[in-house]
Amino acid sequence: MISLTQLKQVTTKYHYGSVLRSEGLMLVASLPQAFVGELCTIRRADETLPDISAEVISISETQVKLMPFQSASGISFGDKLIGSGTSIRLPMGSGMLGHVVDAFGQPLDEQELGVVQTQCVFLASHINPLTRAAIDEPLTTRIKALDSFIPIGKGQRVGILAGSGVGKSTLLAMMSDSCAQQNAVIVIVLVGERGREVEEFVNGKMFKRLRSRAVLVAATAEEMPVTRVLAVKYGLALAESLSAEGKEVIFVVDSLTRVAMAQREIGLAIGEPPTAKGYTPSVFSLLQRIVERCGAFRHRASITALFSVLVETDDFDDPIVDTLRAVLDGHIVLDRALAEQGHFPAIDVLRSVSRLTTNLFDAKKIKLSRAGRILLSEYKQKKMMIDLADAEGTLTGQFQQLKKKHDLLNLWLQQDELSSKTTQELELQLMDIIEG
């Protein structure tokens, strides 16, 4: 939590007001000179209770609406409100690497931070599109389905779309592990997760391997919606500060859907009109701004973004999924049917797309990837006839050859750990399977 002591270190432009009433998640107060995004402190009448931090969400001629970062329990009419005169300032830079922190940059692992700088956390003005660079350098993930069919480049923005329990978090962890071994630094934001899942991730073997090159920001499901949204804004600001230092950054958010849900709560609380599935206009605006902060740049290192997207009830026509598919540079679809068969990672190659394939693959590899997709597509179309012929013992000729190649390719795509093969070796293996 941001304390008044921390505020005194960065500003003296205090102004004062008082709490008038509460409206659901919001507090309504009188605070002259307030601005949207300002950090405030609420001093409760009961002096035994700690101060509460809040952010100004909206303003009018006579009142402001605030969203507290902690529970509003114990706040009463007339409680003193202290405006800081600044937006939230949090620790940034390479001194954060190796740490697990909350949305306020406070260590959760009881380890002291290194030398850090503080700066305001906000989504800055738009990036001049002419300062962006072409994305033409492949990022080797050592995951066969991706490196052979769905290439990812440095600076690309990719979504992993799947329902619950299909392996999104595991795939993100594998990709992060591989990138850390290629001298990238990793900024991981866990939003809306259960506390148990955060603990398991932090103490897992994979995170321990990449920890020295990573910083993890966590805001669990029970935290206030404004805190959950702050976590992803903070993570993005961290990624930008590391990019400015010349470090290639992998920015991982698990999950962007829960960020949207938190922003929906905020939007509804301040009176925004609900649209499809209750999502407010500010949700779609926030998601697009988050995506556009990432990419490849001419004058600083790239920020490659990996976003998990929770597809509720496996509905791929969900408005959040639709919006993200439109603004991302590619998406990886995880198939529940494959996961139920024990096929991991459960990547549906046919439904997954990288919009930068022609930038990242040479002509030979594009041809090989296309041949593999044709094989998978042909088997999918003829699967019922193949299964029927196989059951009757009449499977011969072309169908037999197709089934053999498909089964080999399906087996080849499965892996429990990162591949140790080079890109060239994987290319030769795939060619042998397709050409039979």
Image: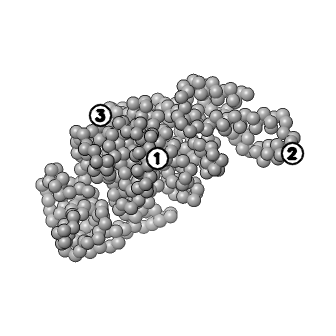
Where does residue 339 sit, x and y in percent of width and height? 61, 48
**Residue annotated with mark 3:** 245
Q: Which residue in the protein does label 1 denote? A: 307
- The residue under the point 34% across, 46% down is 100
Q: What residue lies at 50% left-to-right and 64% top-to-bottom? A: 277
Q: Position of residue 31 (x, y in %)?
A: 19, 67
Question: Is 266 situated left or right of 33 in this image?
Answer: right
- Front residue of 74 and 198: 198
Going by the numbered disc 1, the residue's amino acid type is Phe
Disc 2 residue type (three-letter): Glu
Dot 1, crowdedness within 10 Å: few (<14), some or many (≥20)? many
Sort mark 2 into few (<14), some (14-19) or many (20+) by Cα contacts within 10 Å. few
**Residue 218 vertical position relative to residue 224 in the rendered view, above or below:** above
Q: Quadrant of residue 413?
A: top right
Q: Image quadrant for the N terminus?
A: bottom left
Query: Gap in Å between the C-alphas at discs 1 and 3?
Result: 23 Å
Alpha-carbon neighbours of circle 3 within 10 Å: few (<14), some, or many (≥20)? few
